[in-house]
Image: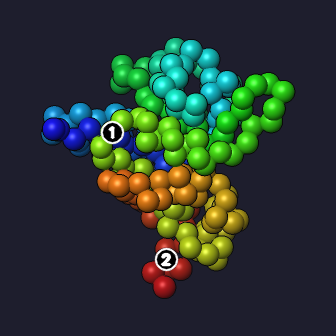
């Protein structure tokens, strides 16, 4: 049985762009590989997606994400001419209910996605933050245990054949504190 790979952004707006580096390397080695992204948008805020789980859907070039933030997934899908798996860390059953963080649904979507080996890619290094002091002064992270990356890390904790890759330490984390 051949391995099927998922290479997904860990949780930030541009993590999927950084994930493309590993995705492309695996594809060049003729590996069955899917590009993905973990984002804080419930599926009911996405037009023209194809759900495969409560908190997982395929994004196409024609998909539209109706939530404030940087959502490059439809554009990347258009450029690659491939669907992208989007895993949502937030769930909203209907419009009368406020979106809520749902780690269990996120984990379920990642598992049901069907890949045997998974890489979650962090572009800036904030996945490596262990204390509040580790964050860059300019960084958005004030609490390293809140936010997109920490939600994904919690969801993937304990999943077999699941790895975290950091592309560039220094964008979101103080290098000097990391070395200490």
Local crowd size for mark 2, using a 10 Å CA cut-off: few (<14), some (14–19), many (≥20): some
Residue at the (67%, 59%) spot, across then down: 146
Per the image, label 2 sits on a secondary structure element best described as helix
Give the total of numbered labels.
2
Snapshot colouring:
rainbow
Give the x, y percent position of residue 17: 43, 41
Residue at 76 percent of width and 25 percent of height: 94
Q: Is residue 157 left or right of residue 104?
A: left
Of marks 2 and 1, the one in the foreground:
1
In this rendering, does residue 97 appear at all? Answer: yes
Q: Quadrant of residue 106?
A: top right
Q: Residues within 10 Å of mark 1 (few under 14, many from 20)?
A: some
Quarter holding the N terminus is top left
Counting from the top left corner in percent of width and height, residue 20 is at 36, 40
CA separation in Å, label 2 and label 1: 32 Å
Which residue bears the numbered disc 1? 115
Q: Residue at x 52, y 57 (%)?
A: 153
Which residue ends up furthest to the right in the rendered image?
A: 96
Q: Quadrant of residue 3?
A: top left
Say above or below: 78 vs 180. Answer: above
Q: Nearer the viewer, residue 148 or 14?
A: 148
Can residue 72 be seen here? The reply is: no
**Which numbered disc flags the more N-terminal residue, 2 or 1?**
1
Using the image as rendered, state which of residue 30 and residue 123 is in the foreground.
30
Looking at the image, is 178 positioned above or below residue 118? below
The disc at residue 96 is: none
Any mark on residue 178, and which?
Answer: 2
């Amino acid at each position: 049985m051949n391995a099927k790979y998922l290479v997904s952004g860990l949780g930030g707006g541009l993590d999927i762009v950084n994930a493309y580096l590993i995705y492309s390397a695996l594809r060049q080695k003729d590996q069955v590989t899917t590009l993905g992204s973990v984002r804080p948008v419930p599926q009911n805020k996405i037009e023209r997606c194809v759900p495969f789980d409560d908190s997982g859907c395929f994004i196409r070039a024609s998909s539209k994400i109706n939530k404030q933030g940087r959502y490059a997934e439809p554009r990347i899908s258009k450029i690659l001419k491939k669907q992208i798996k989007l895993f949502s860390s937030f769930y909203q059953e209907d419009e009368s209910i406020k979106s809520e963080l749902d780690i269990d649904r996120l984990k379920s979507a990642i598992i049901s996605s069907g890949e045997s080996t998974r890489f979650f890619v962090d572009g800036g290094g904030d996945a490596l933050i262990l204390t509040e002091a580790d964050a860059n002064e300019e960084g958005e992270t004030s609490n390293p245990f809140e936010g997109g990356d920490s939600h994904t890390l919690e969801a993937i904790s304990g999943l077999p054949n699941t790895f975290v890759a950091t592309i560039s330490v220094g964008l979101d984390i103080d290098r000097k504190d990391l070395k200490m």
